[in-house]
Amino acid sequence: MHSFITAENNLIKKNTDTKSILYVEDDRSSQLLMQHLLRNKYNVDYASTGQEGLQKAIQNKYDLILMDIKLERGKTGVDLTHDLRSMPQYRKTPIIAITAYAMPGDEEYFKSEGCTDYIPKPLEFNTLFAKLKKLLPESKS
């Protein structure tokens, strides 16, 4: 089953059988890299601020959220994680912190704040794919 959506005046074919991911990241080059990495595997939506991420999460239902922690404007990734966890539809949705915060104790802190998992930057692609495979098992057709 396919549906068609309009995004930024472009007609995009969206596979509704594919898992959907929201990537909240304020760095455009990181968004483009993720778009390239995940383009044939998942439906990926992007938000550049915590507020935009919250609005998209309210309007859509995502299967997983990739969360940059240090967002430049407004809400941080931790703030947005708290907001999402307070919403019934996102209480159990996997949220992966993707962050340059990589000191001892950071992973435990982000998990204690509601993140399901953690990937330090610079991003290791094999780690990303292993975590996505674990948290988004293929649906049996």
Image (tube, helix red, strand yellow):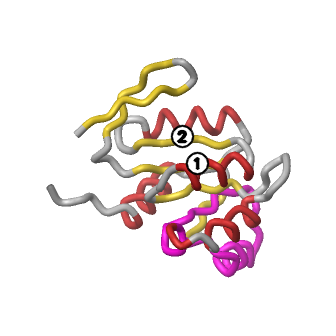
Q: Amino acid at mark 1?
A: Tyr
Seen as rendered, the residue at the extreme right is: 73
**Is 3 placed left or right of 54 in the picture?**
left
Up-down relation of residue 129 to residue 85 (above or below)? above
Residue at the (58%, 55%) spot, across then down: 58
Where does the C terminus fall, quadrant-wise? bottom left
Give the structural element (helix, strand or loop) at label 2: helix
Q: Residue at 51% across / 35% down in the picture?
A: 35
- Which residue was labeled with disc 2? 34
User: Is 133 drawn above or below residue 110 in the view shown?
Assistant: above
Against 29, residue 140 (above or below) is: below
Q: Position of residue 8 (x, y in %)?
A: 57, 23
**Does the magenta portion include 102?**
yes
Is 45 or 35 nearer to us in this picture? Answer: 45
Which circle's residue, 1 or 2, is located before the other in the chain? 1
Q: Quadrant of the N terminus?
A: top left
**Mark 2: amino acid:** Met
Q: Nearer the viewer, residue 14 or 33?
A: 14
- Residue ID at (53%, 68%): 90
37 in the magenta segment: no
Q: Position of residue 26 (x, y in %)?
A: 73, 42
Counting the numbered discs, the total is 2
Which label sits in the foreground, 1 or 2?
Answer: 1
Please provide the residue range marked out in magenta: 90-116
Mark 1: secondary structure = strand
Q: Mark 1–mark 2 contact, CB under 8 Å? A: yes
